[in-house]
Amino acid sequence: MPAVEVNHIVKSYADKAVVNDLSFSVAQGEIFGLIGPNGAGKTTTIRMMMDIIKADSGEVTILGEKLSEASKNKLGYMPEERGLYRKLRVIDSIIYLSSLKGMDRKSATEKANELLSQTGMLANKRKKIEELSKGMGQIIQFIVTIIHDPQLVIMDEPFAGLDPVNTELLKGMFADLRNQGKAVILSTHQMNQVEELCDRILMINNGQAVLYGDLSEIKARYRGNSVLLDCKGELGEIPGVTDKRTRKGYTELTLDGEATPQQVLERLVSRGMLINRFEIATPSLNEIFLEVAGKNHG
């Protein structure tokens, strides 16, 4: 059973379709990246999944059912606009917000202390929220999101304002959630984080899906006709190679479209060259994002 199934959802405001016939699914035990430029419809899609706003048409099922008050407790949602009570102490905030998810005080206190310890925040538990840095507040928000052991966790821009140490901490905790068989949806502008964490992605632009599927397959699909080479010796002319560019520590060879990388490698080896690295160049997700978003811009 998928954690999320979204079928042909549509949402318009003033006759403009913000989300237009969007369909996708998210499996349990995967980290799923929801990406796209500003105004693409990501947050509107999340809000429809959370039943915060209603779709004009189409349907969403979460963990095999339509979202109800009971099934909402199986979700953890961290919105982009954080919502902690600034005058409350950290521990009181966590316990109060846990009670809204049906946790009793004893369980919430035990789990809160465990998560505060895991995130290095235990020493701050008696501080007021307003005394914390933005990054620390973010970690507390994350604790509140997962404390009730949800099956599906949705994060909207979770890395905004985090320093590198807390970013790594959060990434490790996302991986832990996946390893526990939970589904994690990650909506962010930070393509390097998506590339590092996500199993599959959905890119939306102008409310429509423009890229969807396994991240490694998408990267392979956009792979160029060049290879990265680090070798000892003079390259000279290589049949099938139209251009050679020296980069820091390696050379990029552009192939003519006829020769395969395998043939080029064989030609180099037959010359007796010592090859330290030979790798088919794959564009970063950011490069793919810019290419696809640029094509669909309008």
Image (spheres, rainbow, N blue to C red):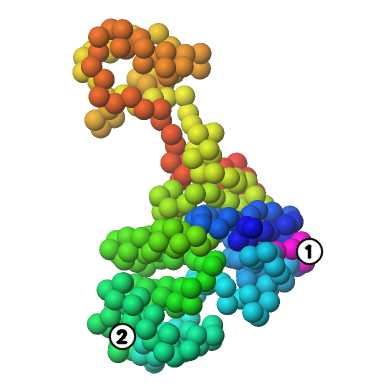
**Residue type marked 2:** Lys
Could you tell me residue 65's position as x and y percent? 70, 68
Q: Is residue 83 above or below residue 4?
A: below
Report which residue position mark 2 lands on: 125
CA distance for labels 2 and 1: 44 Å
Decide which of 246, 125 is in the foreground and name it. Answer: 125
Say which element carries label 2. Answer: loop
Q: Return the x and y of residue 258 as percentages of the image width and height.
A: 51, 13
The residue at 58%/51% (across/down) is: 202
Residue 233 versus residue 278 in the image, above or below: above
Q: Name the residue beneath numbered marker 1.
A: 57
The 10 Å Cα crowd at callout 1, few under 14, some 14 to 19, many 20 or more, is some
Q: Furthest-left residue in view?
A: 232
Residue 276: % across, % down: 25, 24
The image quarter containing residue 6 is bottom right
80 vs 255: above or below: below
Q: Quadrant of the N terminus?
A: bottom right
Left or right for 71, reference 128: right
Magenta-tinted stretch: 56-60
* Identity, as a three-letter code, of the amino acid under mark 1: Ser
The residue shown at (37%, 73%) is 139
Query: As displayed, is residue 208 above or below residue 81?
Result: above
